[in-house]
């Protein structure tokens, strides 16, 4: 009995001592929240590892004299650009005016381009024909727009020519079928709907139009039907 009490007392003493040791270890492992942190020490360590902190350069506001110089320079450039633009415009207008002072000279000739007519049959056995219509200008003025119809007894073909230069030429192409292909001989009526020559009246433009049965294509290689 006495031996049992002695053994129980020893076990209790050992348990108490072990608990005290655990408590001491826990307290040592717990950080002390009251310990002050030396910011200078951390900054020195950071500088050693990564170099000194990069400081932002001071912002210096421009002086009134500097702002005045910048504004003056900008105004000077703007004025120079305006002068150059005005001189260019005056030069163009002067050139245009001088060109239009001269009287209108030359004429307009139109016709089926010589050698462009092609007659064939499609897979259905129908007659098909194609040809080019050339416009040749010997005018000393540019043509802005020329809209006309070539009226034959059975039908009429409409064409529009635009931006033909002075002493220039242009060609339009057409393909059709049927009996009209056998009736394209002779001189058709030329019905002009619009004729605009730079610096000239429409009446004067129309009066200079003539049919030319011997007119040549300005560039046969552009004919899509050849």
Image (cartoon, rainbow, N blue to C red):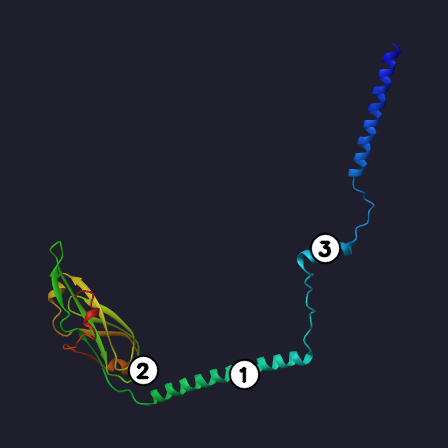
Q: Which mark is residue 45?
A: 3
Query: Looking at the picture, how far across and down is residue 140, in whole percent?
Result: 28, 85
Q: Nearer the viewer, mark 1 or mark 3?
A: 3
Q: Earlier in the sequence, mark 1 or mark 2?
A: 1
Under tag 2, what secondary structure?
loop
Q: Earlier in the sequence, mark 1 or mark 3?
A: 3
Above or below for 136 versus 15: below
Left-right relation of 30 to 209: right
At 84% from the left and 21% from the top, the residue drawn is: 12
At 86% from the left and 12% from the top, the residue drawn is: 3
Under tag 1, what secondary structure?
helix
- How far apart are the alpha carbons under marks 1 and 3? 60 Å
Query: Looking at the picture, how far across and down is residue 104, in whole percent?
Result: 28, 87
- Sort mark 1 into few (<14), some (14-19) or many (20+) by Cα contacts within 10 Å: few
Under tag 3, what secondary structure?
helix
| Quadrant of the rendering where the N terminus is positioned | top right
- Viewer-closest of 79 and 212: 79
Residue to which mark 1 is pinned: 79
| Quadrant of the rendering where the C terminus is positioned | bottom left
- Viewer-closest of 10 and 12: 10
- Sort mark 2 into few (<14), some (14-19) or many (20+) by Cα contacts within 10 Å: few
Left-right relation of 130 to 54: left
Left-right relation of 124 to 159: left
- How far apart are the alpha carbons under marks 3 and 2? 92 Å
The reply to whether callout 1 and callout 3 are in contact (CB within 8 Å) is no
Residue to which mark 2 is pinned: 201
Please tell me in which quadrant of the rendered image residue 149 appears.
bottom left
């Amino acid at each position: 009995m006495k031996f049992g009490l002695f053994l129980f007392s020893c076990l209790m003493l050992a348990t108490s001592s072990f608990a005290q040791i655990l408590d001491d270890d826990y307290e040592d492992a717990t950080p002390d929240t009251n310990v002050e942190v030396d910011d200078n020490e951390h900054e020195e360590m950071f500088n050693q590892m990564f170099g000194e902190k990069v400081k932002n350069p001071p912002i210096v506001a421009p002086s009134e004299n500097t702002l005045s110089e910048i504004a003056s320079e900008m105004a000077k450039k703007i004025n120079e650009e305006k002068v150059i633009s005005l001189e260019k415009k005056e030069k163009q207008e002067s050139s245009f005016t001088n060109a239009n002072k001269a009287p209108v000279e030359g004429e307009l000739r139109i016709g089926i381009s010589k050698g462009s007519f092609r007659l064939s049959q499609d897979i259905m056995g129908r007659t098909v024909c194609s040809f080019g219509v050339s416009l040749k200008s010997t005018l000393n003025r540019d043509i802005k727009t020329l809209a006309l119809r070539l009226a034959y007894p059975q039908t009429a073909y409409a064409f529009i020519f635009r931006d033909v230069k002075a002493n220039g030429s242009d060609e339009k192409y057409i393909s059709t079928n049927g009996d009209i292909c056998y009736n394209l001989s002779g001189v058709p009526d030329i019905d002009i709907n619009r004729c605009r020559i730079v610096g000239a009246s429409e009446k004067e433009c129309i009066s200079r139009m003539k049919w030319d049965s011997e007119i040549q294509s300005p560039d046969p290689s552009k004919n899509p039907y050849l």
